[in-house]
Amino acid sequence: VTKLCELGLDDSVCSVSWAQRGTHLSVGTKLGKVQ
């Protein structure tokens, strides 16, 4: 397992999705940020 991102105590991951071509993973957070 690899750590994908670091979030503050007041934030959490609420969604993940692969890009159409499958080479990038988007991570959405509770505070509305996308990484």
Image (cartoon, helix red, strand yellow):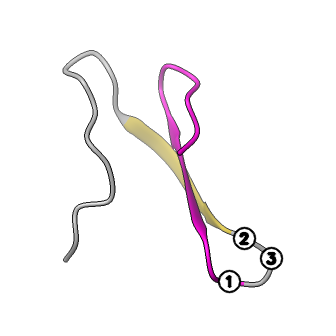
Q: Is residue 22 left or right of residue 32?
A: right
Q: Quadrant of residue 13?
A: top left
Q: Tag 3, which secondary structure?
A: loop
For the residues bearing labels 1 and 3, Cβ distance under 8 angstroms: yes
Type of residue at label 2?
Ala
User: Which segment is the magenta one?
Assistant: 22-35
Give the distance between the C-alpha atoms of the residues marked 1 and 3, in whole angstroms. 5 Å
Circle 1 is placed at which residue position? 22
Residue 35: % across, % down: 53, 45
At a point 33% along the width and 23% down the height, the residue shown is 11
Q: Which residue is mark 3?
A: 20
Predominant secondary structure in magenta? loop
Q: Which residue is mark 2?
A: 19
Mark 1, Cα crowd under 10 Å, few <14 / some 14-19 / many 20+, is few
Label 1 secondary element: loop
- Where residue 7 appears, x then y in whole percent? 28, 33
Residue 28 part of the magenta segment = yes
Residue occupying the far right of the picture: 20
Give, as a three-letter code, the residue at label 1.
Gly
